[in-house]
Image (cartoon, rainbow, N blue to C red):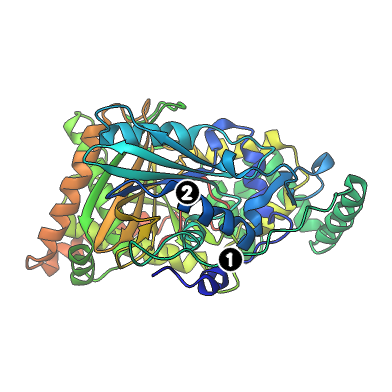
């Protein structure tokens, strides 16, 4: 059967007529191509999907979810966040396409195609999404490549959007059609400008003048951050301290940055990883970050450049029932990557992540995004690039379906996320589906020159963690590790950056 359309429609996030301040900031930051916030997904099916039926489902979805028929209208003179307006020239054929892989139709070819599609910039005069049905995958299989801009939805929002076109069995009937949407009403730009002026003034009046001056000084010159951090109130102290984290990324190997991209993938059984997480006293996300850190350390040692620690950014979900299209926070923290038992690494990272989650409850970038709305984009991109250059890699975790799912007659067999890089060496994103954890490792090929080695080390570390969790632990060793790394993680630079702004990936659980 298909997902009840009433349930699917009710699960969709709330969409506002204007971008949130954080989403508007993401939009502006893309003036720098390294800060592109597009993400995607590569779904492998046991057979090619029924393209006509799929296209019909997506056309229905564009009626149920009006955001899919809307494009962005930038605001004149940067007066607040951009506005969403109906696209009078919306054409479903531009957004839903069908292509065929050349022979032999390998998974490697599919991943390379997805990398090209996801990293091809959106045409900003159209709605910011595309679906590509792919035929010709070896073994008679098919695939679906999804491409979404982060201002449309975050990773979890993308999962909710997928309820519009997934089914619970292969031969599910099509849901009933919806009434055709009304023709878009003409939008008068002069009226929009008046509204934007009113909104911009209202936003400004909510902010104390002294605080506004402080933040403007911070954004104009990041050198002011350390001094202002001691004067700021609690809501900004964590942000200012986090922005003050301008130490370069720690890796001696991953220094170069480029627009060259490579996608590697890995899989691990869901139940085994959950059991390992619980046995070690943590959550699934701790196990995932631990495995990625372990693999990163092994990669460096194998190439003769051992490193004590690396800095990662981690997406933390803040989604509630009333959350809009984006709802997550970001945390930056050091993770141990030296040669050590993986169970000790798990303990150290688990403690750091718990502190990061606590910090996410009090710090927010929304205020900073509001205050920066009228500042030059060049200043904001400079700060964002500086911040990204302090991070080695990013991780994120998205929860998906726990049962078999179908798309237009095709059974989903693999489901790999593609998180945006935002100036880091790689983004590893985890997606749970039907007893498996599917991992997409989106790589800057100039930074990580041996991507296959990184993927092999990720697979090895995942299996190593599962095995180690089943072995008896030494309390003395675990205690020593915690004491050593507690000092590192308690340093002032371990503050938390939270917002619904996203340069790297999707919500953690």
Residue 95 image point, x, y percent: 56, 42
- Residue 228 in view here: no
**Which residue occupies 53% across, 33% down?**
34
Residue 177 image point, x, y percent: 58, 64
Q: Could you tell which of marks 2 and 1 lies nearer the N-terminus?
A: 1
**Which residue occupies 19% across, 41% down?**
457
Residue 186 image point, x, y percent: 85, 49
364 is higher (above) or lower (below) than 74: below
- Residue 64 in view here: yes
**According to the image, label 2 marks what residue?**
52
Horizontal placement of 402 versus 242: left or right? left
508 is higher (above) or lower (below) than 109: below
Image quarter where the C terminus lies is bottom left
Image quarter where the N terminus lies is bottom left
Residue found at the very far left of the displayed protein? 472
Horizontal placement of 183 versus 437: left or right? right
The disc placed on residue 79 is none
**Which residue occupies 55% across, 38% down?**
36
Horizontal placement of 50 versus 239: left or right? left
Badge 1 element: loop
**According to the image, label 1 marks what residue?**
13
Residue 199 image point, x, y percent: 84, 58
Mark 2–mark 1 distance (CA, rounded to whole Å): 27 Å
């Amino acid at each position: 059967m298909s997902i009840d359309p009433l349930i699917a429609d009710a699960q969709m996030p709330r969409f506002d007529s204007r971008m949130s301040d954080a989403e508007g900031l993401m939009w502006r930051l893309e003036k720098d191509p390294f800060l592109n916030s597009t993400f995607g997904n590569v779904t492998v099916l046991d057979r090619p999907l029924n393209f006509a039926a799929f296209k019909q489902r997506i056309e229905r979805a564009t009626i149920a979810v009006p955001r899919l028929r809307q494009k962005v209208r930038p605001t004149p003179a940067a007066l607040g966040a951009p506005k969403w307006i109906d696209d009078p020239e919306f054409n479903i054929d531009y957004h839903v396409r069908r292509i065929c892989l050349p022979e032999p139709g390998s998974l490697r070819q599919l991943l390379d195609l997805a990398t090209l599609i996801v990293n091809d910039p959106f045409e900003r005069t159209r709605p910011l999404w595309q679906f590509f049905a792919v035929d010709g995958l070896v073994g008679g299989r098919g695939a679906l490549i999804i491409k979404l801009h982060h201002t449309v939805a975050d990773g979890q929002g993308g999962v909710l959007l997928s309820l519009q076109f997934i089914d619970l069995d292969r031969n599910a009937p099509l849901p009933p059609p919806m009434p055709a949407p009304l023709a878009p009403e003409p939008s008068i730009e002069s009226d929009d400008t008046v509204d934007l002026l009113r909104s911009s003034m209202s936003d400004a009046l909510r902010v104390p003048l002294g605080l506004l001056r402080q933040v403007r000084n911070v954004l104009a010159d990041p050198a002011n951050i350390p001094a202002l951090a001691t004067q700021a109130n609690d809501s900004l102290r964590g942000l200012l301290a986090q922005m003050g984290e301008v130490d370069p990324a720690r890796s001696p190997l991953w220094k170069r940055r480029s627009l060259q991209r490579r996608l590697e993938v890995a899989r691990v059984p869901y139940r085994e990883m959950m059991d390992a997480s619980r046995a070690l006293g943590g959550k699934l996300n701790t196990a995932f970050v631990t495995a990625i850190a372990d693999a990163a350390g092994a990669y460096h040692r194998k190439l003769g450049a051992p490193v004590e620690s690396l800095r990662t950014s981690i997406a933390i979900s803040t989604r509630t029932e009333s959350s809009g299209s984006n709802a997550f926070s970001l945390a930056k923290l050091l993770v141990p990557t030296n040669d050590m038992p993986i169970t000790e690494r798990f303990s150290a990272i688990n403690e750091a992540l718990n502190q990061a989650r606590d910090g996410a409850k009090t710090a927010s970038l929304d205020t900073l995004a509001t205050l920066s709305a009228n500042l030059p984009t060049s200043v904001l991109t400079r700060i964002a690039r500086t911040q990204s250059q302090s991070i080695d890699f990013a991780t994120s975790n998205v929860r998906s379906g726990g049962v078999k799912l179908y798309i237009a007659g095709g059974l989903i067999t693999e489901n790999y996320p593609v998180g945006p890089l935002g100036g880091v060496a790689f983004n590893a994103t985890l997606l749970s589906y039907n007893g498996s954890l599917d991992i997409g490792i989106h790589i800057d090929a100039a930074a990580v020159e041996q991507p296959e080695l990184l993927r092999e080390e990720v697979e090895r570390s995942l299996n190593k963690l599962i095995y180690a969790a089943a072995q008896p632990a030494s309390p003395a060793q675990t205690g020593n590790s915690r004491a050593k790394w507690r000092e590192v993680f308690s340093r002032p630079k371990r503050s938390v950056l939270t917002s619904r702004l996203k340069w790297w990936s999707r919500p953690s659980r």
